[in-house]
Amino acid sequence: MLRDGSRDDTVAGVTNETATGGRVSRRRFRVLLLVVLAVAVFLRLTDFTDPWSEKGWHALGAQLSNGARNLVEHGYLELRLAPTLDGAPPPDGAPWRFYTNHPPLLVLALAASFEIFGVVEWAARLVAVLASLGALLGTVFLARRLFGDPVALVTAALMATLPVTAFYGTLVDGLGPLLIALIVLGCCCWWRALEAPTRGRLAQLAGALFLAGLANWQGVEAAALIAVVSWCGGQRRIALAAGAAALSVPLLHLAHQGWVQAALPSAPNTDLLDAFFQRTWGGLEPFGGAGPALSAVAHHLRRLYGLPVLALAIVGLTTLRRAPRPAVVLTLAGFALLDMLVFLEGSARHSFWNALLAPAALMLAGAGLVSLAGRLPSASLRTGAILVVTVGIAGWGVLETRDRFADAASTYSRDLGTIIADKTDPDDQILLCESLYDPLKWYARRRMVVGVDDTIVKRRGLPESAGFTVAVVPRRAYSPHEHALVEELLRKRHPLQRVTTEALGTVLVFDLTRNRRTTEDR
């Protein structure tokens, strides 16, 4: 922002006029942005009303939606504003199974949507879709001020179409769009506070980062990093505002955890502080071998972003030395990379974890593209190059995203039958159990037996191999009455080919092609 109030539209020394063959007018910018938003909405509504299923970790939405549904049906104060893991009300005298490992903002947002629109899948996805679009607009705000209009439009096109933001733009999870949108909002408020650190803007910064922390612990990490960077840069008032947000969330969560434990007949941990650190901050996962984990993360990045985008993002790093306030985008990227490396095993297993990097990476990719195009000899060539590359990458993103939505099973569930038969990876078995179990809990509670058969199994949910659907129902992770509820639901609807009981749990193999029911030991 210049002293006269106008915006400095430069991209690493290349103005909008030289980079695109003409300054992007405000009207044209808005029209193009509306077109990009329309494409983004279209892609994110692909599975808007579909049932929960295993594809691409979207079964996580069933787990969180079960907790939100319990809040709506049984009372917010009764459940202490906390998520629960119960798919059905516990029997008389049995306590609810609270899940307080993470702050509850997402589940409360889902519950609010259920209150307005009813307890249906699309009401939960609406929260994620709106947050995804908000993250897109917030990233455009930052890209426009850091790099100019052309980069902002390229960034918007990439965020609208690439799988990392489009396919996971409907993901209902604590590491999903709501967290990313609130962190981006915090960075936008940080930018405004850097321009003029008034009390109002500092309060906005603290409020946005506080909400990001309530969405998940990565929001606290981002607030703490902003506080450290600001303090080192001499912006003490900004550092204090961000630091207050980073400290207040754990304190509030500790108090909330104590309130929840007071509702239990016997506290699971005698020391509340110990329970807080073990269950909340004790989640640092073992690296499990840096080589395989890093290769898995690299595989996710390539499939979700595409190699051209990653290469352009690396080029975009070279443009930061001439961009105003590069600390904002570096902090946004650094926080995501730090979290992905600290939780390396989680980032390797959970592909959507890598979406934390999307706002910074796609901004840098847009800056890299415009910077490279600026070396062409004529304005028309520069404009054409930016347009062709952007449309090409966006087209790949649309096709890849649509393919992912059409895929009948996630990467892990596709190999479920082999994993069970070979018993090579019991950890993956447990993971697959949970991704299958939560959607079944959702439909068992709603008594939608037809929904399980006609939609989840036949349309896109459970893995099928040679006419068989394999379902693994764990015993240790869930209460007995829930286990019996889901097992009975499955038995009623499908001819049962084989039942075996192992240390892991109950393995149910349903023959979808025969109309007979037999039982045999494995």
Image: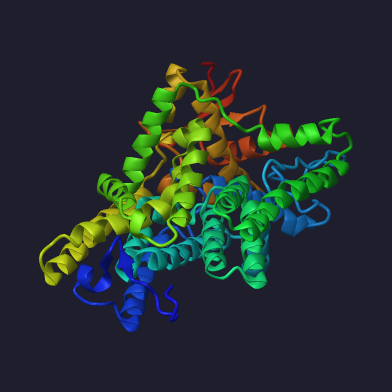
User: Is residue 8 rendered to the left or right of residue 333?
Assistant: left
- Which residue lies at the image location 65% right of the left edge and 72% below the top edge? 200
Instruction: Indicate how the structure is coloured in the image.
Output: rainbow
Rendered location of residue 7, percent (x, y): 39, 75
* Above or below, comparing residue 485 to residue 269 in the picture: below
Which of 2 and 214 lies nearest the eye of the viewer? 2
Quarter of the image where one finds residue 141: bottom left
Name, please, the residue furthest toward the bottom: 27
Quarter of the image where one finds residue 267: top right
- Which residue lies at the image location 42% right of the left edge and 61% below the top edge? 44
User: Is residue 261 rendered to the left or right of residue 497?
Assistant: right
Quarter of the image where the N terminus is located: bottom left
Quarter of the image where one finds residue 265: top right
User: Is residue 485 rendered to the left or right of residue 460?
Assistant: right
Residue 446 visible? The answer is no
Which of 440 and 269 lies nearest the eye of the viewer? 269
Residue 258 visible? The answer is yes
Which of 403 and 136 lies nearest the eye of the viewer? 136
Name, please, the residue furthest toward the left: 377
* Above or below, comparing residue 483 to residue 79 in the picture: above
- Which residue lies at the image location 29% right of the left edge and 50% below the top edge? 309
Rendered location of residue 132, percent (x, y): 48, 60
Rendered location of residue 136, percent (x, y): 44, 63
Count of picture labels: 0
Rendered location of residue 245, percent (x, y): 68, 55
